[in-house]
Image: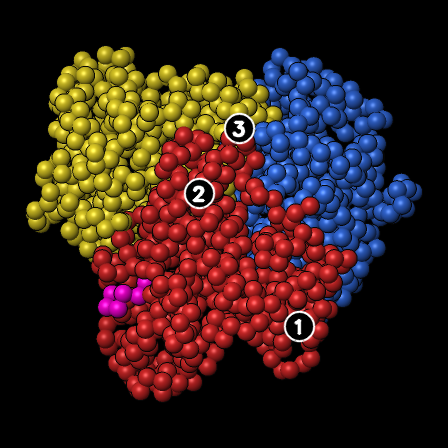
Chain colours: A yellow, B blue, C red
Amino acid sequence: MSLLHPQRLFPADPTTRAITQSLYDGIKHLPIVSPHGHTDPRWFADNEAFPNPSALLIQPDHYVFRMLFSQGIKLEDVGVKTRDGTPVETDPRRIWHVLAKNWMLFRGTPSRMWLDHVFAEVFGIDEILNTDSADAIYDHIAARLQTPEFLPRALFESFNIEVIATTESPIDSMQHHSKLANDAWQTAGGNKRVVTAYRPDPVVDPEFDGFIANLEKFGEMTGEDTFSWDGYLQAHRIRRAFFKQLGATSTDHGHPSARTADLSDAEIQSLFAVVTSGKASAAEAELFRAQMLTEMARMSIDDGLVMQIHPGSWRNHSDKMLARFGRDKGFDIPRGTEYTSALKPLLDKFGLDPRLSIILFTLDETSYSRELAPLAGVYPCLKLGPAWWFFDAPEGMRRFRELTTETAGFANTVGFNDDTRAFLSIPARHDVARRVDCSYLARLVAEHRITENEAHELAHDLTYRLAKNAYKL
Amino acid sequence: MSLLHPQRLFPADPTTRAITQSLYDGIKHLPIVSPHGHTDPRWFADNEAFPNPSALLIQPDHYVFRMLFSQGIKLEDVGVKTRDGTPVETDPRRIWHVLAKNWMLFRGTPSRMWLDHVFAEVFGIDEILNTDSADAIYDHIAARLQTPEFLPRALFESFNIEVIATTESPIDSMQHHSKLANDAWQTAGGNKRVVTAYRPDPVVDPEFDGFIANLEKFGEMTGEDTFSWDGYLQAHRIRRAFFKQLGATSTDHGHPSARTADLSDAEIQSLFAVVTSGKASAAEAELFRAQMLTEMARMSIDDGLVMQIHPGSWRNHSDKMLARFGRDKGFDIPRGTEYTSALKPLLDKFGLDPRLSIILFTLDETSYSRELAPLAGVYPCLKLGPAWWFFDAPEGMRRFRELTTETAGFANTVGFNDDTRAFLSIPARHDVARRVDCSYLARLVAEHRITENEAHELAHDLTYRLAKNAYKL
Amino acid sequence: MSLLHPQRLFPADPTTRAITQSLYDGIKHLPIVSPHGHTDPRWFADNEAFPNPSALLIQPDHYVFRMLFSQGIKLEDVGVKTRDGTPVETDPRRIWHVLAKNWMLFRGTPSRMWLDHVFAEVFGIDEILNTDSADAIYDHIAARLQTPEFLPRALFESFNIEVIATTESPIDSMQHHSKLANDAWQTAGGNKRVVTAYRPDPVVDPEFDGFIANLEKFGEMTGEDTFSWDGYLQAHRIRRAFFKQLGATSTDHGHPSARTADLSDAEIQSLFAVVTSGKASAAEAELFRAQMLTEMARMSIDDGLVMQIHPGSWRNHSDKMLARFGRDKGFDIPRGTEYTSALKPLLDKFGLDPRLSIILFTLDETSYSRELAPLAGVYPCLKLGPAWWFFDAPEGMRRFRELTTETAGFANTVGFNDDTRAFLSIPARHDVARRVDCSYLARLVAEHRITENEAHELAHDLTYRLAKNAYKL
């Protein structure tokens, strides 16, 4: 039996399913536009083979190892490195067996759907993963990874990716993007294929690990005095300009809240002095991040970079896990997130400027219909990012559409983001989004709320045009 | 092709659709009871022709122009008047073309559904609006508006409206309602056709524009000293009695929050002194509004007016838009709204009194199942208003039923409110509500959770009886 | 016509319905595991006949009388006892008629579904309750209740209950459980049939009625000085051990919030002194409850009892109703409940300990996808309790699965809890849960998201295995 049914994720009702099929057939072959994600630009710059199945599909995937951990499996046993160098499992085949043995835990989750897609569509596997099939599947994938067809650039092309954005910090060396800039492959498709995005959290968030050292490096890299407010802002402008040269069309801001501020110059100078002393309180750190969103908006008006705001995650919730394994280990937990009040200072300052574009994300689904759709449905600078992170899954995507469309329509949304480090899952994720969006549109058609012709146009918008336009790609 | 499919909004599953059709056939011809809305009583008092299609359908409809604005269209270009008299577009045909050109923005929104209904059912149009059809549709509507069949009273009758409530402030002259009181048309249907509702926000909310001047006018109109607490309360009683003469059966309270209070006399006197000095802080203003909900409940126990509480909107969110265009321009944004704690002072005071009836609304859907249904499912004075504002749309209405019925049943709800200034959309809005309610009931029947006979009775309740009873109409 | 359709609660779509039927057929006969509830252990210890239909089905059921009360029916008229001895209706037949006359109020509610199930399946009634049928139904049930087949133990067996947990306070005499411990019936099924659970709120919550007196009794029963911190903790250990002897495998904590704390010894000593003085402020009471969750977790690590946290209910919301009728009269109203921040102190202390198991419940559905699923999807000690209280109904259960599965999977959930005082409704409630879970799984199968074989395994897990494992039964 195949791992993937051709009509997976389509509604069961035959009428609606047939409409879904028709809509999906119209857009399934469109190129992938991936305007926000976390793939490693080195892959595309160096084009070296991926090492082995576990290093590719398990060890970097926090969706996978967090579920295993929740059921008592140690991260050490799936080869997640410790900070203090305590030994962890290094045999990729043994790591693979841990996944195979616990594969049933993923029933009903997007990880299962994405990995089945990778197995079936990328590697041509048709057996379900279990302890019996684990070795054969491992060997099959391991062998494929050593062939030219599975090098990063070949996959990029076979995945039909038109453009992909990675995310870098202002103090990143940008060596891989710089290398790509001089490589003919980068523009062989016409425009740039791999672009960056400006993610300044390490130099904007006073609570970020190593913030003061980051500021120092930021100063060295730009030749500015980043411990003076003017020099600090100028350093941002310099790096934003450089990121633009490397294809960036957007910035990204991963703050604990969506709070913005519009302080007086005197207040800012005073706050910046505290922040750069390394002694900011939690409230001062929050206020500084808030002010910086407004400053970033001001710069976006000047340089045209689209802002993305990704608020609401309590990063590294477990102190012990952070100490032992570091960031991004599945311990980022959402919290309630308010927008109506939080965004007002920025919106009062710049919200009606036609040059500004801000894409809002949330991990608090209650804000979709209560705040985000009403805000994006009237402020010309605001658009809604797609269902994010835990909600990048069929039910989450469906709720996003049901909760936002009636107030914000489709034109105030921006298509799909895969937002992933897991390169091989990119086609799977976009395919899920396309199937879910077509299912939603098909329901509107079946209920005579839009026509089928309109649905075909909208399917194309949601798959391709909105992302291209919103991200200026 | 017709703009409207006869089975629009019915579920796709054939069994459920057939049940929906049967339920809908049983109630579609019932008269419209419209107990809460914002139509202009002048229309019915003077019965003059509406000026032109844009003045009727675009310029007063914040749903329509907020969506256009969100996509970069200036309000000036659709003829929304500025406060400072800066010129705006005055040619109704050019305004109409702006809508026609951007009609695709409304796909999936209730505005599209309501306007298609107006086009098809009120004006007999069967072409979709676009730049090609814009002139013909404009001319067709413009011509119709000059015919006797399209005068306000003729439309009222052809819409099969039994009774409609408008909303007026205590300091309104009430000239149109007074004129209607002496017009035989007003009671030609038996009971009063057009009634008012008492909306005291301008004299209850210390943060309302011109609050002190409003209090002065309130005093002049009632002959009471509205700057003394006793005189102020007496002025309310006087105007409530007058509103009752003009058919009012309800009051309406549009506060930022649902907070209520039960202060001592000394506290009230002290708070009232601050409030009438025009120097109330935000917290004092909030506390005064809170106390006034309790005072209004006390008066409702005496005079029988049903209270409506509409909390949770941050009115006029954009300072610049308020300054330029004034209130009600699509910039009212919801916020999280709490009820369990907020209503306790009022409920502890009067919540068990059988003479009191309070209808609760929300712009925070999270409160449906968490607070509102549990509260209305036990307190005899509380009932749930229908899905409101941004949620007065098919998905919003469906969520309302799914989230409240299991805890509060149907009898603690009050039927539908159209809550609109857009007179021509009233049949469309009621029709959408009927279709969505029938679809919900049909699913309960199809899943054998109620019988079809029960569903027919409930469909009648939700369409007609609950509104008549809850609003004492 | 039968009151119950064999395919009730199954989705209408024929494909999905057929899959649901197949899944349901596979698990409908599995024994009932009831790990959390509020039945009276006296029933099973003494095995005496239930007195009459109203005393069994109306007077103790707050779901039933709160709905009646919300529509103006006095609790006195359905025989709910007053605290001051004011007379109430005592004729069970007249009470029964109140329900019959108002039966239509329950359309669409779970009470209706549960009672119809009791009528049809337990008593073999096939007439709908109304004023005409009321007497016949009353007589039929009353007669049955006097027969041996309707004694508590006979019903227990005919309901196919494998094990049921009741809930007792540390200062309960435990006489019924003690009596059961010496009765062969208790273990005739192999393991214990009726077990207790440790619910220490009366001696943990400084705001509980009679807290100081409760502490005194707690000291008397354990021989510990419960007004010293060490003695107080030791008293808990003693009673926990005794509850374990009586079959307890879990504790239960019904706090207003999910807040936890990890205070220093000095802070605890100081707080405990205030608390035991009877003068704790609301904030101090909250902090003490918070600290006690952490203390209870510490003890659970030692003795293996599974913790259940049931936060978010504002108990006895109406002061007047509490004064007149006492606790548990339908006036418990949910509030917004936060977990991510609230649980951090406990999780930082013990959250990675493999011996700890905590089951989280909520009355705030917004926390399902935002906080609870992300937390349970990574912390090995956390699992999600099923849809609770107002959400223990078809739509509520469906939302629970849709909002948690994609992030937490199925293995981080614990099957169903009936959580009821209404013994006769237990089969009905479990049957509803089984039908809703099978419907959800069937949709995943119909949409090719899991295979039918996987769904059969999962249906078994959700019905039986997860509850047995999570509660160590």
Q: Position of residue B231 (x, y in %)?
A: 73, 68
Residue B222 lies left or right of residue B274; in this view the side is right
**B437 or B147, nearer to the observer:** B437
Residue B278 coordinates in the image, percent (x, y): 59, 61
Q: Residue under circle 1?
A: C79
Q: Disc 1 to disc 3, how far (Cα)? A: 49 Å
Identify the residue position indicated by label 2 in the image.
C26
For image coordinates 27% across by 65% down, the residue present is: C304
Q: Are marks 2 and 3 in contact (CB under 8 Å)?
A: no
Residue C204 at x, y percent in the picture:
38, 74
Q: CA distance from mark 2 to mark 3?
A: 24 Å
Residue nearest the observer in this picture, A431 or B247: A431
Specify the amino acid type for callout 3: Asp
Q: Is residue B125 left or right of residue C217?
A: right
Q: Name the residue nearer the viewer: B449 or B144.
A: B449
- Residue A13: which disc? 3
Task: Evaluate whether residue C145 shows in this view.
Answer: yes
How many neighbours does mark 3 have within 10 angstroms: few (below 14), some (14-19), or many (20 or more)? many
Q: Which residues are magenta?
A: C301-307
Task: Tell me where residue A73 appears, x and y as whole percent.
Answer: 21, 48
Q: Is residue C299 depicted above or below A167 in this figure?
A: below
Amino acid at the residue labelled 1: Gly
